[in-house]
Image (spheres, coloured by chain):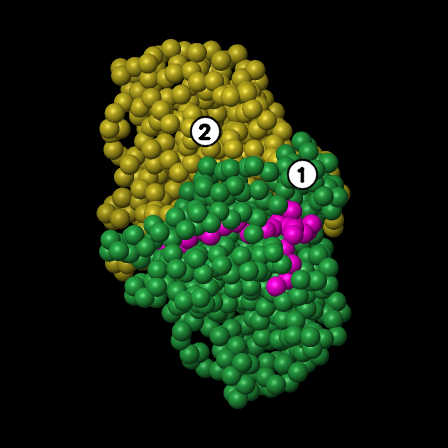
Chain colours: A green, B yellow
Amino acid sequence: MSDLHLLTASEAARLIREGRITSKELVTSCLAQIDAREPTVQAWHYLDRAQALAQAEAADAAHKAGKPHGALHGVPVGVKDVFDTRDMPTENGCALHAGRTPRHDAAAVALLREAGAVILGKTVTAELAYYTPGKTRNPHDPARTPGGSSSGSAAAVAAGMVPLALGTQTNGSTIRPAAFCGVYGYKPTHGLISRRHCLRLSRTLDHVGIFARTLEDIAIAGEALMRFDDAPAAGEDEDMRPAAPAPLARVLAEEPPVEPKLAFVKSPVWDQAEEVTKEAFAELVEALGSKAEPVELPEFFAEAWPAHKAIMEADIAHNLRREFERGRERLSPAMQQAIERGRAVTAKDYLAAQALARDLAAEIDDITFAYDAILTPAAAGPAPVGTATGNAAFCTLWTLTGVPAVSLPLLADEKGMPMGVQLVARRGDDARLLRTARWLAGLLTGGAAL
Amino acid sequence: MSDLHLLTASEAARLIREGRITSKELVTSCLAQIDAREPTVQAWHYLDRAQALAQAEAADAAHKAGKPHGALHGVPVGVKDVFDTRDMPTENGCALHAGRTPRHDAAAVALLREAGAVILGKTVTAELAYYTPGKTRNPHDPARTPGGSSSGSAAAVAAGMVPLALGTQTNGSTIRPAAFCGVYGYKPTHGLISRRHCLRLSRTLDHVGIFARTLEDIAIAGEALMRFDDAPAAGEDEDMRPAAPAPLARVLAEEPPVEPKLAFVKSPVWDQAEEVTKEAFAELVEALGSKAEPVELPEFFAEAWPAHKAIMEADIAHNLRREFERGRERLSPAMQQAIERGRAVTAKDYLAAQALARDLAAEIDDITFAYDAILTPAAAGPAPVGTATGNAAFCTLWTLTGVPAVSLPLLADEKGMPMGVQLVARRGDDARLLRTARWLAGLLTGGAAL
């Protein structure tokens, strides 16, 4: 039973449901993997083995008592340390928040528990989910960054420590580390997963993200998390809309009714792509033939990057005002500078940026009309050597517009470092996006179909 | 039949439904009243008699053909000239918009038509629904202002030209002119009536408002207008939430299950109230006895007024940027100055003001827990002599927080000029607010019950 930690979340949940393994065995295997790999990878900010095992034992007891199972019953999940947890500290990667013990679970954590998940521990985040990296290293090469800011969650899934982990994305914080670590990363349509009791950087830009080793696990976790939060208090999550639950897992399992068609979008930051990325995408697009068409974005899309910066920095200045006023010297220089820039943004520029974001999202609706998804790089290249979280430019546009995006670990450079293929869809088209992703992954890994 | 114009909307709709009068007779009577009073009152910016009569004839033809009736079938309604109309110009009280002929009806206008209403014409608005008054005079005394910015709608209803009219409120533009003109004015909870294709000053502050001569008409029109707008495009109305239709008319007709209790709130601007207002409210509260309790707002409520100003001016600077850039010299000096101040607001102050608005709304939820409604003046005093739209300070807090408010024409000064009693409730409590308003009006006009 020593390889239980390599089970996917859906396999593990099935085996637990069928009584063929226990949650305790699974969690024990994950903890053993953590023992083996954590000294190098350093994915965890908080992990209490006894607490994790106690949750697993409770899941097993519920199973024995014949209680109903959620979709993730007994399955361990890593949670980025920006989601509040009522039974574990939540320190947001910030010295000023050391020892912080929130009273409530974040909505996303509560939903994971409701689905039966074991909250294994809290994963390392860059300082305040922004820029300054934590201790985590890339599991494929400890000399390299895992990407950030959801560094620990991406690395923990990649290192086989846990099948599933929660992250967030305000610029590239889910898609980029997923690409660097060679796992699936998913940022749903803005407003589909509640951010209540999650560190707030920007109401407009913050998204909850999911890491897993299969698309099926992404879909199962996504479904568990997409629950309308109908009474957020002031400053929590005002952007949710009630909607029928997205049937992610069901649609994912379907064959596309007609062969999908992808729009290959280089985007206005193509000149930031490394040669290896340009070459890999040239090959990929050539191999896809008529299944992918180059599509050029209208020129005004270039305004997305400064608009994102204006919104992000102004929102950070607002949402982190207490930290800045009370202890700015304990924030990293990069964070202090971002806040200082944010304090100088005018409401006029801020509102123009917000209006642009809405216009761009509407334009993406138009552009994607004839396509199943947009095909574009997840990052400029593979994970760089060092600790800096890397370039998020290939994520910025899709975060600003709130459209769903998924990174697929389908490419690698000559050293074997993973590179991500990003698929993006119009707002609300999450289920079809995942189905299209499965189709593309099947094509590229099956090989023959190409 | 010469007094048909004095029918309420609900009476008129009933008589039309029963075949006892025709829409054409009703509209003809309203047009005659306009002929008589318009030279003094000047409520209308656009009125085409033939077009109005053609709509009435169409309503009568539909009736004769046995087609289903909406709640306002054949009833004429005045529409503030900031709502787009596909068949009449919409000039927003702005020289730069002269000759503007939109292709679409505003959502609120389309819903009125769906309910069977005759769109009689477009009523005078202050310049861009802001500050600089139009030509309209107070029907009770032409030397005085009708209040603004929904000047024509309030005056037209007060002068018996039309039983019902649409306005808007971004600060005090519905409640204040209703109070000055001695009619009912209602500003529903923010987000309950779509503002699609209505002049936008501020996403946060703009509300659609309703004027009528009875609460029943307010309720019927409110119900017709509260329809979820599920697919607003960028920059239209992002703040609607789907909700079961508010049963305004049904709840209004009920007796309160227990005797209502009012919180008498002077608010932090009490020192701006004129002596006549202070005296009238002292008498009113004394007469109400145990039915009203003085409630003091926490000190931080005083921050609402500068917060409202920051949001309004920054939003105006954003939403009127094209007018400012292309033709600032054709805007009034007051508008130019507001936009200039708005351009200097920082995103930091803007976001702090938005956060304060949410906190205040939550606080109002707490304060109103033990009360059916808040009782407070609708304006500082009766309509002042002159044309200036008057002091909106008694509306600002309730607009900023998006709570529902209604002005009741229950008081008058020694010259007989009307004064408004304002009732306010927590967000979403619109139906109970109107029921409480009917109870209060019954008490004060019935007399004996006090």
User: Which residue position is annotated with label 2?
Assistant: B364
User: Which residue position is annotated with label 1?
Assistant: B348
Q: Which of marks 1 and 2 is nearer the N terminus?
A: 1
Q: Magenta segment range?
A: A115-139
* Residue A288 in the image, given as x and y percentages of width and height: 59, 84
Residue drawn at 33 percent across, 14 percent down: B290
* Residue B51 in the image, given as x and y percentages of width and height: 46, 53
* Residue A307 in the image, given as x and y percentages of width and height: 69, 54
Residue drawn at 25 percent across, 25 percent down: B258
Residue B213 is covered by the magenta coloring: no
Label 1 is placed on what type of residue? Lys
Q: How far apart are marks 1 and 2 (CA)?
A: 24 Å
Q: Is residue B149 above or below residue A237?
A: above
The crowd level at tag 2 (other Cα within 10 Å; few <14, some 14-19, many 20+) is many
Q: In this view, does B90 lie to the left or right of A327?
A: left
Check the picture and name the quadrant holding the N terminus of chain A. Answer: bottom left
Q: Is residue B168 left or right of residue B25?
A: right
Q: In this view, does B411 lie above or below A309?
A: above
Label 2 is placed on what type of residue? Ile
Residue A136 is covered by the magenta coloring: yes
The crowd level at tag 1 (other Cα within 10 Å; few <14, some 14-19, many 20+) is many
- When asked about the image quadrant of residue A324, the answer is top right
Q: Which of marks 1 and 2 is in front?
A: 1
- When asked about the image quadrant of residue A138, the answer is bottom right
